[in-house]
Image (cartoon, helix red, strand yellow):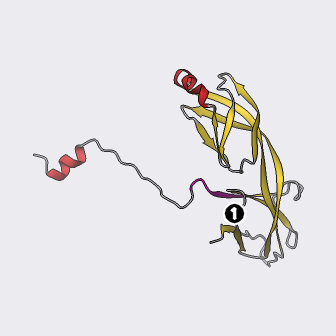
Amino acid sequence: MASPIEKLQERVKGSVSVTFSYRCNASIAVELDADLNDDKSCFLYGETVYFRMYSIPSRIPVDIYTSMGNAVLNNNFLSENVEDQEAAFTDEKSFTVTKPIITGPSNVRWFGNDWGPLVKVDQGTMRYSAATDEKILAQHVANCMYDYTTEYRSGYLNGVYSSEDKVNVTVYIIERE
Protein backbone atom coordinates (compact mmCIF):
# COMPACT_ATOMS: atom_id res chain seq x y z
CA MET A 1 0.00 0.00 0.00
CA ALA A 2 1.37 3.43 -1.02
CA SER A 3 2.05 6.00 1.64
CA PRO A 4 0.41 9.47 1.43
CA ILE A 5 3.75 10.91 0.21
CA GLU A 6 4.04 8.26 -2.54
CA LYS A 7 0.44 8.93 -3.60
CA LEU A 8 1.20 12.65 -3.78
CA GLN A 9 4.33 11.98 -5.89
CA GLU A 10 2.30 9.91 -8.38
CA ARG A 11 -0.18 12.69 -9.12
CA VAL A 12 0.07 14.81 -12.26
CA LYS A 13 1.17 18.26 -11.21
CA GLY A 14 2.03 21.63 -12.70
CA SER A 15 3.38 24.92 -11.46
CA VAL A 16 4.32 28.34 -12.70
CA SER A 17 6.95 30.87 -11.65
CA VAL A 18 6.08 34.53 -12.03
CA THR A 19 8.56 37.39 -11.91
CA PHE A 20 7.51 40.78 -10.53
CA SER A 21 9.65 43.86 -11.05
CA TYR A 22 9.54 47.63 -11.03
CA ARG A 23 10.29 47.48 -14.77
CA CYS A 24 9.92 44.61 -17.21
CA ASN A 25 11.77 43.99 -20.47
CA ALA A 26 14.87 45.95 -19.43
CA SER A 27 18.36 44.94 -20.53
CA ILE A 28 21.89 46.12 -21.25
CA ALA A 29 24.01 44.66 -24.05
CA VAL A 30 27.67 45.56 -24.61
CA GLU A 31 29.71 44.62 -27.66
CA LEU A 32 33.02 45.58 -29.22
CA ASP A 33 32.78 48.43 -31.73
CA ALA A 34 33.97 46.66 -34.88
CA ASP A 35 34.21 49.94 -36.80
CA LEU A 36 36.45 51.76 -34.32
CA ASN A 37 38.48 48.62 -33.48
CA ASP A 38 39.12 47.76 -37.15
CA ASP A 39 37.39 44.38 -36.56
CA LYS A 40 39.99 43.36 -33.94
CA SER A 41 39.04 41.31 -30.88
CA CYS A 42 42.54 40.92 -29.38
CA PHE A 43 44.48 43.96 -28.26
CA LEU A 44 48.03 44.78 -27.22
CA TYR A 45 48.74 46.24 -23.80
CA GLY A 46 48.29 50.01 -23.89
CA GLU A 47 45.88 50.02 -26.84
CA THR A 48 42.44 51.62 -26.56
CA VAL A 49 39.46 49.30 -27.01
CA TYR A 50 36.13 50.75 -28.14
CA PHE A 51 32.72 49.29 -27.31
CA ARG A 52 29.02 50.04 -27.71
CA MET A 53 26.38 49.88 -24.99
CA TYR A 54 22.76 49.25 -25.97
CA SER A 55 20.05 49.44 -23.32
CA ILE A 56 16.32 48.88 -23.17
CA PRO A 57 14.95 51.38 -22.35
CA SER A 58 17.52 53.21 -24.43
CA ARG A 59 18.35 56.12 -22.14
CA ILE A 60 18.71 54.65 -18.68
CA PRO A 61 21.41 56.13 -16.41
CA VAL A 62 24.26 53.68 -15.78
CA ASP A 63 27.50 53.30 -13.85
CA ILE A 64 30.58 51.64 -15.34
CA TYR A 65 33.27 49.59 -13.60
CA THR A 66 36.32 47.71 -14.83
CA SER A 67 38.59 45.05 -13.39
CA MET A 68 41.68 46.79 -14.81
CA GLY A 69 42.46 50.01 -16.66
CA ASN A 70 40.10 52.94 -17.22
CA ALA A 71 36.66 52.56 -18.76
CA VAL A 72 34.67 55.57 -19.98
CA LEU A 73 31.13 55.66 -21.38
CA ASN A 74 30.25 58.76 -23.41
CA ASN A 75 26.97 60.54 -22.67
CA ASN A 76 25.96 61.10 -26.30
CA PHE A 77 23.69 58.67 -28.13
CA LEU A 78 24.59 57.54 -31.63
CA SER A 79 22.20 56.15 -34.22
CA GLU A 80 22.74 52.83 -35.99
CA ASN A 81 20.84 51.14 -38.81
CA VAL A 82 20.32 47.47 -38.05
CA GLU A 83 19.73 45.58 -41.28
CA ASP A 84 18.76 42.07 -42.32
CA GLN A 85 17.71 40.85 -38.89
CA GLU A 86 15.95 37.50 -38.88
CA ALA A 87 12.85 36.48 -36.98
CA ALA A 88 11.31 33.02 -36.85
CA PHE A 89 7.79 32.58 -35.53
CA THR A 90 6.53 29.21 -34.25
CA ASP A 91 3.01 29.74 -32.86
CA GLU A 92 4.26 33.04 -31.36
CA LYS A 93 2.99 36.55 -31.85
CA SER A 94 6.04 38.52 -30.72
CA PHE A 95 9.80 38.43 -30.21
CA THR A 96 12.39 40.47 -28.32
CA VAL A 97 15.50 42.22 -29.59
CA THR A 98 18.79 43.01 -27.79
CA LYS A 99 19.18 46.51 -29.24
CA PRO A 100 16.46 49.11 -28.60
CA ILE A 101 14.02 49.82 -31.44
CA ILE A 102 14.02 53.59 -32.01
CA THR A 103 12.34 53.59 -35.43
CA GLY A 104 10.99 50.74 -37.49
CA PRO A 105 10.66 47.98 -38.28
CA SER A 106 10.99 48.58 -42.01
CA ASN A 107 11.75 46.63 -45.16
CA VAL A 108 10.05 43.47 -43.84
CA ARG A 109 10.58 40.47 -46.14
CA TRP A 110 8.73 37.21 -45.47
CA PHE A 111 10.08 33.89 -46.76
CA GLY A 112 7.21 31.53 -47.44
CA ASN A 113 4.27 32.27 -45.16
CA ASP A 114 3.57 36.02 -45.18
CA TRP A 115 2.09 37.31 -41.93
CA GLY A 116 1.91 40.96 -42.97
CA PRO A 117 3.52 43.97 -41.31
CA LEU A 118 5.68 43.83 -38.20
CA VAL A 119 4.87 46.43 -35.55
CA LYS A 120 6.89 47.82 -32.65
CA VAL A 121 5.30 46.98 -29.28
CA ASP A 122 7.94 48.75 -27.17
CA GLN A 123 11.69 49.41 -27.45
CA GLY A 124 12.48 45.74 -26.95
CA THR A 125 9.58 43.90 -28.58
CA MET A 126 8.09 43.47 -32.06
CA ARG A 127 5.12 41.46 -33.22
CA TYR A 128 3.30 40.72 -36.41
CA SER A 129 0.10 42.59 -37.19
CA ALA A 130 -2.92 41.50 -35.15
CA ALA A 131 -4.85 41.28 -38.42
CA THR A 132 -2.97 38.07 -39.23
CA ASP A 133 -3.96 36.13 -36.09
CA GLU A 134 -6.02 33.69 -38.17
CA LYS A 135 -3.02 32.85 -40.35
CA ILE A 136 -0.98 31.66 -37.36
CA LEU A 137 -3.72 29.16 -36.49
CA ALA A 138 -3.49 27.65 -39.98
CA GLN A 139 0.23 27.99 -40.72
CA HIS A 140 1.97 27.84 -37.30
CA VAL A 141 5.39 29.00 -38.63
CA ALA A 142 6.85 31.93 -40.55
CA ASN A 143 10.28 33.48 -41.16
CA CYS A 144 11.11 37.05 -42.06
CA MET A 145 13.92 39.59 -42.26
CA TYR A 146 13.56 43.24 -41.27
CA ASP A 147 15.49 46.45 -40.62
CA TYR A 148 15.25 49.05 -37.85
CA THR A 149 17.11 51.95 -36.30
CA THR A 150 18.65 51.69 -32.85
CA GLU A 151 20.85 53.90 -30.68
CA TYR A 152 23.84 53.25 -28.46
CA ARG A 153 26.38 54.94 -26.26
CA SER A 154 30.02 54.62 -27.25
CA GLY A 155 32.69 53.82 -24.71
CA TYR A 156 36.33 52.87 -24.45
CA LEU A 157 38.77 51.01 -22.25
CA ASN A 158 42.43 52.02 -21.98
CA GLY A 159 45.37 51.89 -19.59
CA VAL A 160 45.56 48.09 -19.44
CA TYR A 161 49.06 46.83 -18.63
CA SER A 162 50.31 43.59 -17.06
CA SER A 163 53.44 41.46 -16.84
CA GLU A 164 51.32 38.40 -17.76
CA ASP A 165 51.33 37.11 -21.34
CA LYS A 166 47.57 37.51 -21.54
CA VAL A 167 44.83 38.91 -19.28
CA ASN A 168 41.06 39.20 -19.56
CA VAL A 169 39.48 42.48 -18.47
CA THR A 170 35.85 42.80 -17.44
CA VAL A 171 33.91 45.99 -18.13
CA TYR A 172 30.75 45.99 -16.01
CA ILE A 173 27.86 48.34 -16.74
CA ILE A 174 24.91 48.52 -14.37
CA GLU A 175 21.81 50.66 -14.19
CA ARG A 176 22.22 53.50 -11.69
CA GLU A 177 19.91 53.38 -8.68
Label 1 neighbourhood size at 10 Å, few (<14), some (14-19), many (20+)?
Answer: some
Residue 175 in view, yes or no: yes
| Position of residue 4 measured from the top left corner of the image (x, y, whole percent) | 15, 51
Q: Nearer the viewer, residue 2 or 14?
A: 14
| Residue 24 placement (x, y as % from top left) | 56, 55
Q: Position of residue 85 (x, y in %)?
A: 74, 39
Residue 84, compared with residue 167, is above or below; it is above
Q: How many marks?
A: 1
User: What are the residue bounds of the magenta stretch?
Assistant: 24-30
Residue 140 falls within the magenta-colored stretch? no
Image quadrant assignment for residue 30: bottom right
Q: Is residue 123 left or right of residue 155?
A: left
Residue at 77% over, 75% down: 164
- Image: 144 above or below 65: above
Give the residue type at disc 1.
Ile
Quadrant occupied by the C terminus: bottom right
List the residue tagged with mark 1: 60
Q: Nearer the viewer, residue 110 or 49?
A: 110
Residue at 73% x, 33% y is: 145
Q: Look at the image and tell me whether residue 43 can be seen.
A: no
